[in-house]
Amino acid sequence: MIISNSSPLILLAKINKLNLLEKMYNKIAIPYEVYNEVVIKGKNENYSDAALVEKDINEFIFVKDLNSESKKEAEKLKKILGSGESEAIALCVQEKARLLLIDNLEPRKIAQIKSIKCRSTPGILLEALKNKTTTFSEYESAIKELSKYAWLSGDIVAHFLDAGYKIKQGEIK
């Protein structure tokens, strides 16, 4: 099972690449708080990406409930992380998820301590290029577009563009 936090959904919707998640992973689970952050709060703020994500709810994005033990774990995590991040990590533990889609560094570190494999939004795009779900041209454009919305330094953008070029050249498989 693949679990997502809010930011990859929001960012991929902003750059019109949300469909990659379905192509790559078939189904994505999110906890209720991620749904609340992305769809409910997003629509209240009139964010266009909220409507795009909402359209995919119950198509390939599914809201999954936390059990009572996971709710307790999420409450502990909320002392140091955001609500969506806390519930996403707790849901990963509950479901023994194989991957957590998440961007922020602090929650990624905590997830990794719990042996949860994480992938960032640029990492999702790179994986799409590796498995030929997207072309190099589409990848390059998506990384550049993503840098308009995400907190990506010039070095990070250059790193992902370089990695994509190496995949294109066959240097990385």
Image (cartoon, rainbow, N blue to C red):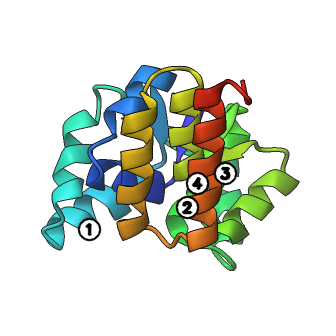
User: Would you name the residue on which mark 4 appears?
Assistant: 102
- Tag in front: 1 or 3: 1
Q: Amino acid at mark 4?
A: Ile
Which amino acid, by three-letter code, is at mark 2?
A: Val
Q: List the single residue furthest toward the bottom.
A: 79
As helix, strand or loop, the secondary structure at mark 1 comes to helix
In the structure shown, which secondary structural element does the residue marked by tag 4 occupy?
Answer: loop
Residue 44 visible, this orientation: yes
Q: Is residue 82 left or right of residue 116?
A: left
Marking on residue 41:
1
Mark closest to the chain's N terminus, 4 or 3: 3
Number of numbered discs overlaid on the protein picture: 4
Q: Label for residue 90?
A: 3
How many angstroms separate mark 1 from mark 3 (CA)? 21 Å
Q: Is residue 88 left or right of residue 142?
A: right
Q: Please rate how many residues cluster around mark 1, counting C-alpha atoms within 10 Å: few if below 14, some from 14 to 19, many from 20.
A: some
Q: Disc 2 or 3, which lies upstream in sequence?
A: 3
Kindly identify the residue that appears in the image at 57 percent across and 21 percent down.
Answer: 131
Which-is-in-front pick, marks 4 and 3? Answer: 4
Q: Quadrant of residue 34?
A: bottom left
> How far separated are the C-alphas under marks 2 and 1?
29 Å
Label whose residue precedes the other's in the sequence (1 or 3) = 1
* Local crowd size for mark 4, using a 10 Å CA cut-off: few (<14), some (14–19), many (≥20): many
Check disc 2 and report its element: helix, strand or loop.
helix
Q: Amino acid at mark 1?
A: Lys
Looking at the image, is mark 4 or mark 1 nearer the viewer?
4
Residue named by callout 2: 157
Taking 122 as reference, is 140 left or right?
left
Can you see residue 32? no
Measuring 23% from the left and 56% from the top, which residue is drawn there? 50
